[in-house]
Image: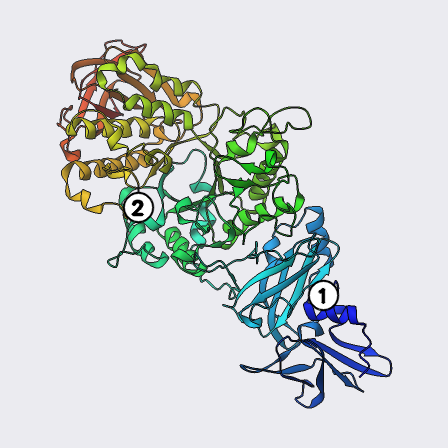
Amino acid sequence: MDIGLDRAELTLLAQGRHVDPFALLGSHHEGDGWVVRINAPGANRIAVYHANGSLWGHAERVWDGLFVAHGDGDPGRYQLSIQWPWGVERQADAYAFGPLLDEADLRAFHEGHLVHPADIFGAHSVKVGDTIGVRFAVWAPNACRVSVVGDFNRWDGRRHPMRLRHTAGVWEIFIPGVQPGARYKFELLDPQGRLLPLKADPYARQMEHPPASASIVPAPFKIQWHDAGWMEGRRETQRRDAPISIYEVHVPSWRHGADGRPLQWDELAAQLIPYVLDMGFTHIELLPVSEHPFGGSWGYQPLGIYAPTARLGRPEAFARFVDSCHTAGIGVIVDWVSAHFPNDAHGLERFDGTALYEHADPREGFHHDWHTLIFNFGRREVRQYLIGSALEWLRRFHLDGLRVDAVASMLYRDYSRKEGEWIPNHYGGRENLEAVAFLRELNQKVAEHCPGVLVIAEESTAWPGVTANVSEGGLGFQYKWNMGWMHDSLGYMQRDPLYRSHHHHDLTFGVTYAFAERFILPLSHDEVVHGKGSLLQRMPGDEWQRFANLRAYFGFMWTHPGKKLLFMGGEWGCESEWDHDASLDWNALNRPYHEGVRRLVADLNRVLVHEPALHQEDAHPRGFHWLIADDAQQSIYAYMRFGRDDVPPVLVICNFTPVPREDFRIGVPVGGAWREICNTDSDYYAGSNVGNGGMVVATADPSHGYAHSLSVRVPPLATLILRAEGE
């Protein structure tokens, strides 16, 4: 039989290494007739049928697994009947189909303008003519061959080598008959033709439950949303002058079911949402929920940034969870990682045999602290991959915000590096200019495509303008975590009250920069791990004093300028450090002191929401005024919070010693009655119940620069919050 190919081409085709398999496989008009070539290693017999079911011809084996059939007429959209040792398969031929990706989309990707790349890349169930199958596409410009392998071809890379689209270094193929739920990976040969470890799909929207690591062909995403009202009003709900109090949650360890396993999304919705509503939090912030190989990373080392983790259920279940939160009036924020990725062999590391997603030089591309690889933010394709992921979570799952992790590590080329371990930018500086450009582009794209969404920076340095507009030279975030406030205030609270007078400035210093950015005050998961102990464990004194200190601290936090964030378990004074493998100790709420803290946090959230003076001017100095900032001897702080227009002002007094203060004189801006709206020492919160009977009347005795003043009882280790009721 004259097959028209030389020995070298036959060998390359049979081995799945030919540079252009579509040029030879499939049907071709050659000479006076037609030929159909099929590479099916391990097949016994192959027949070619017309679409109407009539036989076109039988194929003969000509070289290893390579079969050839000849005929006089065009076989058209033919089907193959392949007899395998394990059965017969009848399906259309992948090599009978031309390119499917639009050249304009590929050009946009190459130029850096493709907004939603996951709509192009990855695995998509499509119908081409009358043939149903899956279109696969992957970016691997330096590979000399890419194949799709999976359940549908017994993981044999010779079966489905892909077509290279040279415009953008993208490989694609349409494989008929593949169904949603099929597992797959990409098999690549590096530029030298060496076989690489099988790679998961960077754009996979669904993945296997770890430790398995295959990508999964997703079913068409069908979710009936009920949150139209929330989405329409979100821009107002998340305005800068709105009350925001965030409950940070690591889903696998929040609560376990009766069988000892973490709750799945639908179970979580039934339990977490009512709890958060009862606690008065406005938002839930989830530690990363994208797929990640190592559970001990808490999701901060992801390898599937388009796929919700299979540990907690299907992607549709996650969407239902968000929908349920919205219908209950709760916003959902997710931690999102764009700084780095782990070096697992099935991941992005040297994806096509070259440093594709990362930097080639470890001085730019390797993170010593986490032993991870740093994204190359200077590559257009990498920026699109990351920004596409951010927009995917926001538009596909209706998320209300993203907290961008480890921003400080992105901004500085010398972050956590010794001299000689980093490369300066082209100006000779330490700033990572490519990362700065990426973050600005990210925030601009989010603002353009998802208006009203919050993008929050975990940024621990003094980088200027993190929350300033990009047009003003800023990074464009809506909020920044106030790590300085967290560090100073926790450091102060850990000290014995006897010595706090020597560190009085730890609680006043934060106000000097409180309005330089729009801040969130975070008591996050990072503060209750790695030997730091729980918040309660860090409070000094006997049992009563530890709980009193924690309650007073929460009172200070909730009245300080800035939005609020508290990690789960902190709201009741969890006794032990957080363990990501174990459930929170919910039995603690059966004990009065713990239940008292929980009640307090719930009431502080309600006070925050109902008192505009505590949230309207969070980011402006006109919303805050010190009354007492220098009483180090008594460790007392007092300040006013103001809202706009006719909003009643709020007075806050904090006593961080166990000594009550009787007849304490404090100036106030208006006369008349002042209502005690929260006293962290109330017996309702398991305190000693030193207070003012609910109401205090101002007298015309000037004090602290005001014409009126109050005489109050200041309870020990407590925060008092009073609101002006008027004449």
Label ID, residue 99 = 1
Which element type, helix, strand or loop, lies under badge 1? Answer: loop
- Give the residue drawn at x 58%, y 66%: 149
Mark 2 or 1, nearer chain start: 1
Q: Quote the CA–CA distance across marks 2 and 1.
A: 50 Å
Identity of the amino acid at label 2? Val
649 lies left or right of 467? left
Marks 2 and 1 close (CB-CB < 8 Å): no
Q: Residue under circle 2? A: 276
Residue 308 visible in rendering: yes
689 lies left or right of 332? left
Would you identify the image quadrant in which residue 495 lies?
Answer: top left
Q: Where is residue 281 in the image (x, y as percent from the top left)?
A: 33, 41
Q: Is residue 696 above or below residue 327?
A: above
- Give the residue drawn at x 83%, y 83%: 33
Which element type, helix, strand or loop, lies under badge 2? Answer: helix
207 lies left or right of 692? right
Identity of the amino acid at label 1? Pro
Would you identify the image quadrant in which residue 42 lies?
Answer: bottom right
